[in-house]
Image (cartoon, rainbow, N blue to C red):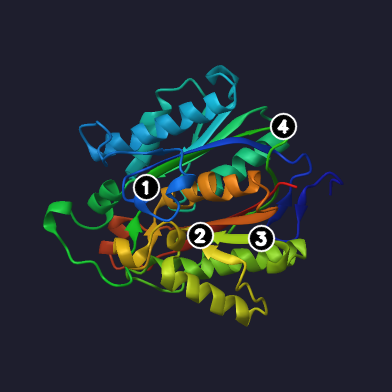
Amino acid sequence: MSSNLKRIGLQTVELKSYPKIISTYSVVGPKEGDGPLKNYFDKILCDDCNGQESFEKAESSMMITAIEEVIRKSNLEERQIDYLFGGDLLNQLTSTNFVAREFKIPFFGLYGACSTMAESLSLASMIVDGDFAKYAIATTSSHFSTAERQFRFPLEYGSQRKIQSQWTVTGSGAMLLGKTGNFPYVTHVTTGIVKDYGIKDADNMGAAMAPAAVDTLYKHFKDTGRTAKDYDVIATGDLGTIGRTLTEDLMLEYGYDINGHYIDCGEKIFDNERQKTNSGGSGCGCSAVVSCGYLYKELLRKNFKRVLLISTGALMSPTSSLQGESIPGIAHAVAIEFK
């Protein structure tokens, strides 16, 4: 076995060159811009359509802005970007594929459901660390109205929302990674495995994804020898109130108390009581805008020194739900430091 192998433990890689997150950019809708994290977002839209003729085009327009602006903030040009990693929730990655055609950047389209931010960040980090690229972008997006239309009911139907349901975040985030500079950097990537505990309720995705988040976090702790106390913040992507509670309880069964270090991006992005989002936020854009906004900017301000982002995904489709299939979950973890 090569002595240069960067894999440690079962599912984790240690990135020795510390790929730098040179800049981030976040775009959110008006509801997200009215939430507790509004001051952390780079751009807040006036309306969900963003001047477009469809919600799908509006979602693409947010991602285009995020990519263009993250390149501009890095003082780079499009031609200098070696790879673009991105995805969304829609069939055939509609939003991201139509975004990629607007750029002349080699593109990998990814589908990890709501885990796509950590998935794209993982791959971008590893490709920069492995000297396959000098610069790479990780991005994703979601939109409340496009997700409702695809996975639930048309907005015109006016369906009642269950107490355990979550509100898909309208937003897009992008991170630009490189090899040099004094910026927050990625140290470890723990790639998740698919976990399915038989949850079939598409309105209870927090419960469906929580086992995957717990498994990935537990494997990360075992592989690295770390505990919750080694992190200022451990942030899951979009488990919401129910999934966050389950995660805390299940981690205690593994012998790890994460209380006091653990947040969920879906709980953090909305004021659930005032904004009536039930169990909290969800969607690819949820962990994207919270990590590109709140987590990254708090790292820059030195309020955080080490964070662990665990984006969580429910790997369902409209077809699988109609056929009565259970919901597989996935979670990927990325450790980021800035000292």
Circle 2 crowding by C-alpha within 10 Å: few under 14, some 14–19, many from 20: many
- The quarter holding residue 168 reads bottom left
Task: Name the amino acid, label 4.
Answer: Lys
Circle 3 crowding by C-alpha within 10 Å: few under 14, some 14–19, many from 20: some
Would residue 278 appear left or right of 72 to someone viewing this image? left
| Spot occupied by residue 208 in the image (x, y as percentages of width and height) | 43, 69
Where is 184 relative to 68, above or below? Answer: below
Task: Name the amino acid, label 2.
Answer: Ile
- Precedes in sequence: disc 1 or disc 4: 1
**Mark nearer the viewer, 3 or 4:** 3
| Residue found at the far right of this picture | 3
Whether tag 3 and tag 4 are in contact, CB under 8 A, the answer is: no
Q: Which residue is drawn at 38% across and 54% down?
A: 35
Is residue 22 visible in this depiction of the protein? yes
Q: Name the element at disc 3.
A: loop
Q: Mark 1 points at which residue?
A: 33
- Precedes in sequence: disc 2 or disc 4: 4
- Precedes in sequence: disc 3 or disc 4: 4
Q: Name the element at disc 2.
A: strand
Whether tag 2 and tag 3 are in contact, CB under 8 A, the answer is: no
**Mark nearer the viewer, 2 or 4:** 4
Where is 77 relative to 13, above or below? Answer: above
Number of marks in picture: 4
Where is 50 relative to 191, above or below? Answer: above
Q: Mark 2 points at which residue?
A: 330
Q: Which residue is drawn at 74% across and 41% down?
A: 18
Task: Name the amino acid, label 3.
Answer: Asp
